[in-house]
């Protein structure tokens, strides 16, 4: 991903215990079976427009949270957000994000695989120097972007289902980031600490 997933509640911080607690994954509820069914059904419609959704998500993200641009060296100095709508680089990045969402949806019935996927993404974001506080933003912008596509299929229940999924995935990503941070801080010399790559794209 690159920068990533604040309209969504952020219930985890980097100091929290493992997401593999009793009761499942650190107290952050995963979607119920009814919610999983709703998400998967709505994704069938959304995926036909994933390139468009990806661009909308990131243009809106940069509008509502301009500080996120700092993580993307290609877009850091872009003042005219309209230019981004035709950017091949932004389209490619948006598609990568949509691909992650698609994989997450596909793994909702296999939570261990989803957990591994999201934690690995959080670890990679540590090396992109993409701070965890940004992760929930993408989910909020995704939800705003897909409502017009789903039209009358969009309901309060479906919105809650998507929010639950993004909260769950975001928590797992934060755990992956925290784990990678701890490992790197333990292994690095004092001089090396804090010098991470800052190139999300």
Image (tube, helix red, strand yellow):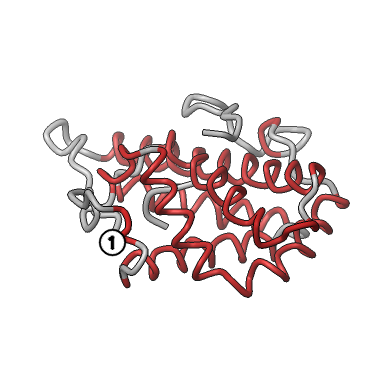
Q: How many marks?
A: 1
From the top left corner, tell me how far across and down residue 53 is, in percent.
53, 62
The answer to whether residue 43 is above or below residue 15 is below
Residue at coordinates 41% horizontally, 39% vertically from top-left?
64
| Helix, strand or loop for disc 1 | helix
In the picture provided, is 51 more to the left or to the right than 144? left
From the top left corner, tell me how far across and down residue 130 is, in percent.
34, 44
The answer to whether residue 27 is above or below residue 120 is above
Residue at coordinates 58% horizontally, 71% vertically from top-left?
49
Q: Nearer the viewer, residue 141 or 15?
A: 141
Q: Nearer the viewer, residue 66 or 137?
A: 66
From the top left corner, tell me how far across and down residue 103 is, in percent.
61, 65
The quadrant of the picture occupied by the C terminus is: bottom left
The residue lying furthest to the left in this view is 191
In the picture provided, is 39 more to the left or to the right than 197? right
The answer to whether residue 14 is above or below residue 67 is above
In the picture provided, is 150 more to the left or to the right than 172? right
The quadrant of the picture occupied by the N terminus is: bottom left
Mark 1 is surrounded, within 10 Å at the Cα level, by few (under 14), some (14 to 19) or many (20 or more) other residues, namely: few
Q: Which of 102 and 61 is in front in this view?
A: 61
From the top left corner, tell me how far across and down residue 160 is, in percent.
75, 41
The residue carrying mark 1 is 83
Quarter-wise, where is residue 25 in the image? top right
Quarter-wise, where is residue 28 in the image? top right
Residue at coordinates 66% horizontally, 39% vertically from top-left?
20
């Amino acid at each position: 991903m690159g920068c990533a997933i604040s309209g969504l509640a952020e219930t985890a911080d980097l100091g929290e215990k493992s997401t593999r607690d009793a009761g499942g994954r650190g107290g952050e509820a995963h979607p119920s079976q009814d919610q999983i069914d709703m998400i998967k059904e709505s994704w069938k419609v959304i995926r036909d427009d994933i390139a468009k959704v990806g661009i909308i998500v990131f243009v809106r993200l940069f509008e509502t949270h301009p500080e996120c641009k700092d993580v993307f060296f290609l877009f850091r100095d872009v003042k005219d957000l309209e230019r981004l709508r035709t950017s091949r680089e932004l389209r490619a990045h948006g598609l990568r994000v949509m691909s992650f969402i698609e994989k997450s949806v596909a793994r909702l019935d296999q939570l261990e695989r989803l957990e591994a996927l999201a934690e690995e993404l959080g670890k990679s974001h540590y090396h992109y120097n993409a701070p965890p506080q940004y992760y929930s933003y993408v989910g909020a912008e995704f939800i705003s972007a897909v409502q017009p596509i789903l039209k009358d299929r969009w309901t309060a229940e479906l919105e809650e289902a998507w929010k639950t999924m993004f909260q769950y995935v975001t928590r797992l990503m934060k755990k992956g980031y925290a784990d990678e941070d701890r490992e790197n801080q333990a292994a690095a010399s004092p001089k090396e600490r804090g010098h991470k790559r800052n190139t999300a794209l």
